[in-house]
Image: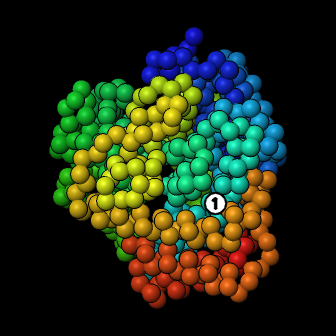
Amino acid sequence: MPQSPGGRPPSPRIKLAVVGGGSTYTPELIDGFARLRDVLPLEELVLIDPATDRLELIGRLARRIFAKQGHPGRVTWTDDLDAGVDGADAVLLQLRVGGQAARNQDETWPLECGCVGQETTGAGGLAKALRTVPVVLDIAERVRRRNPDAWLVDFTNPVGIVTRALLTHGHKAVGLCNVAIGFQRKFARLLGVAPDQVELEHVGLNHLTWERAVRVNGEDMLPKLLAEHGDAIADDLHMPRRLVDRLGVVPSYYLRYYYQHDEVVRELRSKPSRAAEVAAIEKQLLDLYGDPALDEKPELLGKRGGAFYSEAAVALTSSLLADTGDIQIVNAFNNGTLPFLPDDAVIEVPATVGAAGAVPLPVRPLEPLFAGLVANVTAYEHLALEAALVGGRYAGREGGRNAGREGGRDTAREGGSRAAREGGRNAVFAALLSHPLIGQTDYADRLTDELIAHNREHLTWA
């Protein structure tokens, strides 16, 4: 019987559902499931998405990839969430409410106010959280009614806020990001060792992390990496080498939005948005996916983003289902790991993963330079989640029926009372004012108005 990473056999009959299966990124997942079938032996893979035209295109490609690589599992697809998740052992969430059009807005209107436009942080990240959290919670409730024992693996951004919403509402969930596995692969290549020999001391919040050590056989190789490959590492981060040297750690590339905010704003104003670039790539990918001779993920998919997500998703899902107790870098409740944060904050650190979920490992005291920013963004994430839940239970969404389509809309009740509108606006303003990339009343006021104007159809109280 195939063995899991921790040495225990996973379930021989695994059904996995992917909500957002119509994403152009899904073939990356499919390729990973096919290659790593000994780690995660799927009997059935269900792709779920209301965008039936894209879903069938990608579903047929998935079958061809499985067939080429000799995977015996069955691939199906459906636009019916309840039917798709029925009997699933785990459900992967990779949806984008509003599609690339909404992302393009998230990345552009904050720039008009002189602030970073980005889909996971700042005002754009808050907009995405407000659209996404109610939809994901509705999906999670429907999964729980069908399969109370099923695990939710969240890859939907902003991962930290979405995972916190899921855990706070009692769902069996773990958040996943590909930043850590990307660093692991990169450092392994630079050091000339196998990736599984590299152990990262990765600490912080989702998209707000630092690599404080890179251990191989117990020896910290970070000083060697910075001394011999510092220029290449800094170039990949788009940060000055002198900054990386002064920090003495390798920051996530998302920290550039904090460390070089004004420079990034100037750059973003001078070129098309990342959403526009991705939309163009997606159009080409869909043309490729329609070729009945294609039976592997195309090279172009590498430009779509999300490298190594499939490997991370396979490892995490296998560990949860097989109770391996191995160590992976995930998003989970803090529960005292970083003592200056509340227990219900969601942090991104190495954790022991098994049938009980993810339990963070002890962490060395975090330096004030990093701890201050972590505490600030954690406070923002708390307020962002409060804003996302304005309007009642999951803001009255029917997100499970509408979620998963990258080009789709979700539904919302029309209008709302004056009190609800004022409460919603105040919650958005508080979250924006607390964010370290904003933090000024005039900016927060203007960004609040812009966010509501661009997302009114997703806000029940607006």
Give me the residue at 65% from left, 35% from top.
Answer: 149
- Asked where in the image residue 127 lies, by quadrant, the reply is bottom right
Q: What residue type is labelled 1?
A: Thr
Judge the density around disc 1: few (<14), some (14-19), many (≥20) Cα neighbours within 10 Å: many
Q: Is residue 404 visible?
A: no
Q: Nearer the viewer, residue 69 or 202?
A: 202
Q: In this view, does 216 lie to the left or right of 10?
A: left
Count of numbered circles in the view = 1
Image coordinates of residue 1 in percent, x first then y, are 57, 10
Residue at horizontal 23%, vertical 51%? Answer: 365
| 179 versus 2 height, above or below | below
Q: In this view, does 267 lie to the left or right of 46?
A: left
The reply to whether residue 120 is visible in this rendering is yes
| Residue 303: x %, y % from top left | 54, 47
Compared across the picture, whether 247 is left or right of 303 comes to left
Q: Which of 84 and 443 is in front in this view?
A: 84
Residue in the image at 67% along x and 49% along y: 140
Q: Where is residue 191 in the image (x, y as percent from the top left)?
A: 27, 32
**Residue found at the far top of this picture:** 1
Label 1 sits on residue: 132
Q: Is mark 1 on a helix, strand or loop?
A: helix
Q: Where is residue 123 in the image (x, y as percent from the top left)?
A: 52, 72
Which residue is at a point 68% across and 20% down the rendered structure image?
13
| Quarter containing the C terminus | bottom right
Q: Quadrant of residue 56?
A: top right
Front residue of this view, candidates 315 and 232:
315
Q: How is the image coloured?
A: rainbow
